[in-house]
Image (spheres, rainbow, N blue to C red):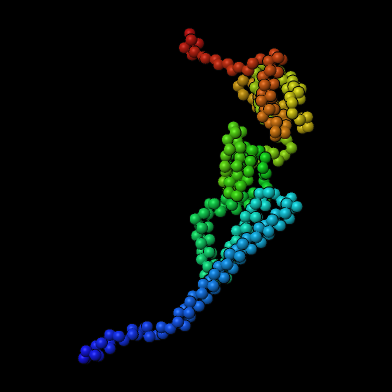
Amino acid sequence: MNTQEIANSAFEPIPFLLQIPATPSNFQGIIDTVLKVVTEVGLKIVGAIVLWFVGRWLIQLALRLMSRALRSKAIDPTLLTYLKSTIAVTLNVILVVAILGFFGIETTSFAALLAAAGIAIGAAWSGLLANFAAGAFLIILRPFKVGDFICGGGVTGTVKEIGLFVTAIDTPDNVLTFVGNNKLFADNIQNFSANPYRRVELVAQLDRTADHQAAIELLKQKLRTIPNVLGDPAPDVEILEFNLVGPVLAVRPYCNNDHYWQVYFDTNRLIRESFGEAGFPAPEQRYAIRNEAAMAL
């Protein structure tokens, strides 16, 4: 190769540049293509944003209409919260899937992935979901309501709130206690507020020398003077059992649950004061010590 051929080969264009002719019209074509792509993507983004806000507005509108309809039917507020939360989550997931489909993303694989994630989360949060399901049953079956005095899940107190996962209970010593709904629902539940009245159960010990019939009549008369003790059913005073000291009386007045502790303490005080004023002997237990050696002499 002579000097002229080398010089000519040095100025030969690179092969791939031959595919794009260096003309002003080609630059304009590239710009037009970029603008077309940006415009299409931009329109899709704007459309997705509009779809999101319109969808969210429609979801909120549907939830408001549902709430208004259920309130008119006197649906429990806690159950209403459950329904609103469940429907809102479901509609939002449908909205997201619709937006992804608007962008051309295959939603079938996304739905499968979402289902798999739901199974994994459900397995990891099985206890939490059990509390959620138990809370739903507590709302539907209504073994108690807010304000009731209950015993359940090892806790006794007044129900302050029935939540999605836990129930808040104020114990008699004013301690706010949260009990898992699943534990509460799986255990025995005693609702002291369900019936119009309850019975106060106390005992009175008599000495063996005391007249039990006079003691019974005295307590029956005195119990009627205690505030908030019901006359119907009338208080029960009967012999419950016998021990080494003497007969034991069952003292059982009836009252509303709101007055239980007031009647409980007043009855205890009345037993002590009534027996003292009537001159009943104080119960006492006597012990006899036998000295076998002295007796042998």
Residue at x-position 55% and y-position 16%: 287
Image height check: is 39 above or below 277? below
Instruction: Give the residue drawn at x 57%, y 42%.
Output: 178
Q: Nearer the viewer, residue 6 or 180?
A: 6
Residue 185 visible: no
**Quadrant of the rendered structure where residue 196 is?**
top right
Q: Nearer the viewer, residue 138 or 106?
A: 106
Whether residue 77 is situated above or below residue 101 in the rendered picture: above
From where the camera sits, is residue 242 visible?
A: yes
What is the x, y in percent for residue 96? 57, 64
Q: Is residue 296 above or below residue 114?
A: above
Quadrant including the N terminus: bottom left
Give whichever of 81, 287 is nearer the camera: 81
Instruction: State the residue at coordinates (58%, 38%).
Output: 176
Residue 144 percent coordinates (x, y)? 67, 44
Q: Which is nearer the eye, 213 or 236? A: 236
Taking the image as shown, residue 295 lies to the left or right of residue 10, namely right
Question: In the image, residue 110 lies at what x, y percent?
Answer: 53, 67
Residue extending farthest to the top is 297
